[in-house]
Image (cartoon, rainbow, N blue to C red):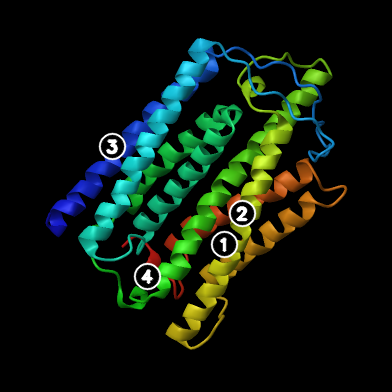
Amino acid sequence: MTPDSLAALSDSLFSVSVALYSLAVVAFCAQLAFGRRPAPARELVGAGGPAGPAAAPAPAPAEDSRGRRWGAIAIGLTALGALAHTGVLVARGLATDRLPWGNMYEFSTATVLVAVVVYLVFALRAPGLRHIGLFVLAPVVLSLVAIGLRLYAEAGPVVAALRSYWLAIHVSTAVIGFGVFVVSGIASVLYLLKTRHDARVASGEASQEGILARLPGAAALDRVAHRTAVFGFPIWTFAVIAGAVWAEAAWGRFWGWDPKETWAFIAWVVYAAYLHARTTAGWRGKPAAWVNVVGLGVMIFNLTFVNMVSTGLHSYAGVS
């Protein structure tokens, strides 16, 4: 196949992946709608209580055959979408004869793929976690639509500043770290919603019904957020260090407080604070979860506003 045909294939697979993920969202909605309400938790995690070993996790949601069937369909569609999504990057890489994350369109597309793969790993290892699929795949679809509409760039060579083996080291680890943090942040948001719902149920202010009642237990959500952050933090740390080394080779200094460098470091500090808070008495539970949510906000701000609005040495990483 010619480079032009491979580029066209990449664009077509992008549309296919969005369609498959959209169908997966519908199937996840059906799973939540038709599956039976989960059995009551043996022990609820209070609004400000810890979610450590002392907290008994809620049992996995008990579903009828329709709920399980829709859940299996949703996971299957998500896996097919991830394959098509992978094809987007592979075809573009072959078309351009380089790693396919040399601009904002490619970087963002790869980051979303990492988030989907991380979710699939958790969902396949712990079927009870499939119930968070709607809350992962819906942002995935919205993100890909925004990426396709606002960040799309024609397949082509990267600017001279990016023609370095550090692209494979620095940018690849940044993609992986960011994608992992996306799942971690979503899990913390769901944890905060779940603890609030459980507290209202315990006080008699709410019934054990609705979408939040069908989510995994608060302790399970907190573990997902923590484990993904533990996995992603050293990767992000390496990405920041590799970026500094690349900066010294390209610009003659390791650090210059460029906006991109500054916000990458701020994100590192926030996630370090989250991991510390998660193991500190008085900060476990909701306070730590809020720190993790702030971390996700910083990452998104760094990807969007810093890349597309601010000016600096990283401006070439914009939409073209």
Q: Which residue is mark 2?
A: 231
x and y percentages locating residue 268 in the rendered image = 64, 63
Q: Earlier in the sequence, mark 4 or mark 1?
A: 1
x and y percentages locating residue 279 in the rendered image = 80, 51
**CA gap, disc 1 and disc 2:** 7 Å
x and y percentages locating residue 129 in the rendered image = 59, 31
Q: Which residue is mark 4?
A: 316
The answer to whether 33 appears left or right of 19 in the picture is right
Q: Which residue is mark 1?
A: 235
Up/down of 97 relative to 217, above or below? below
Q: Amino acid at mark 3?
A: Val
Question: Foreground residue, 76 or 319?
Answer: 76
Foreground tag (4 vs 2): 2
Count neighbours of disc 4 (C-alpha within 10 A) and say few if under 14, some if 14 to 19, many if 20 or more.
some
How many marks on residues? Answer: 4
Count neighbours of disc 1 (C-alpha within 10 A) and say few if under 14, some if 14 to 19, many if 20 or more.
many
